[in-house]
Image: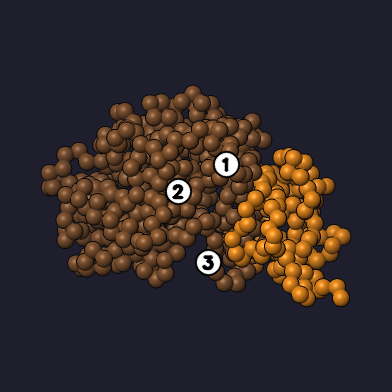
Chain colours: A orange, B brown
Amino acid sequence: MAKIRVPAVDGMFTMDFNNPRLIGGRGITSRSYYFPKDLSGADPMCVNDEKREEVYLSPEAQIWSYTSADYPPALPYQIKEPFEPFLICAAQLSEENLVICGQMMPGIDINDLEVGLDVKLALDVLYEDDKHEYIVWKWDLA
Amino acid sequence: MTVDEIAVLGAGMHQWGKFPGKSFVDLGVHAAKEALGDSGVEWEEIEFISGANTVRNGYPGWVSASTFANALGFQGCQLASSYAACASGVTALSIARAQILSGICDVALVVGADQVAKGMFAPVPGERPNDVDWLRFRLIGLSNPAYFGMFARRRMALYGDSQDDFAAVKVKNSNHGAQNPNARYAKSFTIDDVNASPVVADPLRLLEICSTSDGGAALVVSSLDYAKKKGIKNPVKISGISTVSPVYPNAIIDMPYFASDSWAISGDGSHTFKNQIAQHAYREAEITPADLDFAEVYDLSSAYELDWYEHIGLCEPGEARNILHDGDTTIGGRIPVNPSGGLGAFGEAIPAQAIAQVCELTWQLRGEADGRQVENAKIGMSINYGMFGHGSSVIARK
């Protein structure tokens, strides 16, 4: 039986595998963008805002920088044994002027990456248990 | 802005390394006794202890000032314990300075020490999906070296830096640290040694990323009047301290965040906290970068040291590797950086590290840095950055 797909954390991205979007916030007063919606630092202009507007952030971005994780990260990262090194990308959303980190989709070679390259948002399995696949956003080559 | 100065009467450290048989209290007490001995001030004379906390050693670490005071022998002095991640040491020093300059006390002891498990730092355990420090590990596996790798790769793309440029920083700092008895690593490494070590966070290798260390550091600080009464002529003086927060929006990602602030409104995609930290210290001390004779910067990685050259104004953005290769930042050069050996030679003992930087400023300004002395050192700066947004910088002068 197929495992049930659930987000690894609630409320940070949509679960639409064909057109996933990160769920960000927007300041009412200054119109600043935030990600994650309620966990990023506030624009001081918005000190009197009661809440942040919810917005879907653009799925297209350019690589701001990238690196590799050649050693297993510490808990609470969930490691599949044996540990497979992975790539991390910080991508700049052109419209929101916001840089967001994510793993690169598996199977991409680091030599194929370059600062400025176009990437797009994707969803992938982060870890799994007997019944569930826990899903997270990643970046993929556009 | 003019801020009155305070005097550094004593500096003391416990060597950095791995000391599984010792507790952070042992290391802090050792450093405190060294600083007291160096100052000529008796323990009973200390009126205030400012402790830099450790969050990895249970409750005693969260109330470090009383822990150290108790270990030295409770004598009724006033206490403050504070935590500001890697900036904890300078936060503790700034509290001591405020007590002294306000006249509440004349002489204070500042202490920080850490004892940590081997390997990469991990967030506090538990399920905490509202904590970005927890989320960055859980969702992305974004450990500290990953930030260092991304900053290094960004330099390569923006400025044309190479992996050998980064390795050369490690070589320089290892040569400096080999002359420092308090450093953890006594070895002088070569570019080939660095390149033979495994990649941790591309483009950075194991020898280019600072390790987690045990260590302890302490300072005895006082009013200038107290120093005079003690008969101490021309003590080293603290003339500027920065503990500033960032100014929104921070366009450059910093630990532990996994997203930058948006600069859609401000339009400045290069605005970074790390450019702001030193500015406050310069204003308090009423000097400019050109006045510095040397600096101790937080080289969490080899490439990160090059970022600091630019953040504190030693050169224009993109020129760091030129002043490195010209020898400017090597002892004997125009503006030696990390004459102590820096984190490359020490590793990092979080609450002790910023205090250790000020110990090095003190010894350099007194001309007591045997084997690694910066000639005619009159003004020095230390700088680091505490995760979540704690600035930390000190300017000391002869």
Q: Which mark is residue B347?
A: 2
Residues at badges 2 and 3 in contact (C-beta under 8 Å)? no
- Pointer 2 and pointer 3 on the same chain: yes
Q: Amino acid at mark 3?
A: Val
* B104 to B385, vertically: above or below: below
Image disc number at residue B248: none
Image coordinates for residue B232, horizontal then vertical, percent: 16, 43
Q: Amino acid at mark 1?
A: Ser
Q: In x, y percent, where is residue B335? A: 41, 29
Residue B124 - label: 3
Is B41 placed above or below B159 here? below
In terms of image quadrants, where is residue A24? bottom right
**Mark 1 closeness class: few <14, some 14–19, many ≥20 residues within 10 Å:** few
Q: Evaluate whether residue A11 shows in this view.
A: no
Nearer mark to the viewer, of 2 and 3: 2
Q: Are marks 3 and 1 on the same chain?
A: yes
**Mark 1, residue position:** B197
Taking the spot 65% from the left edge, 51% from the top edge, the residue there is: A69
The residue drawn where x is 69% and y is 52% is A85
Circle nearer the N terminus (3, 1): 3
Cα distance, mark 3 to mark 1?
30 Å
Among the 4 quarters of the image, the one containing residue A36: bottom right
Q: Chain of mark 1?
A: B
Between B35 and B256, the one lying in front of the other is B35
Indicate the quadrant containing the N terminus of chain B: top left, top right, bottom left or bottom right.
top left
Choose top left, top right, bottom left or bottom right for residue A48.
bottom right
Q: Amino acid at mark 2?
A: Gly
Q: Residue furthest top?
A: B326
| Total number of numbered discs in the rendering | 3
**Circles 2, 1 touching at the beta carbon (< 8 Å):** no
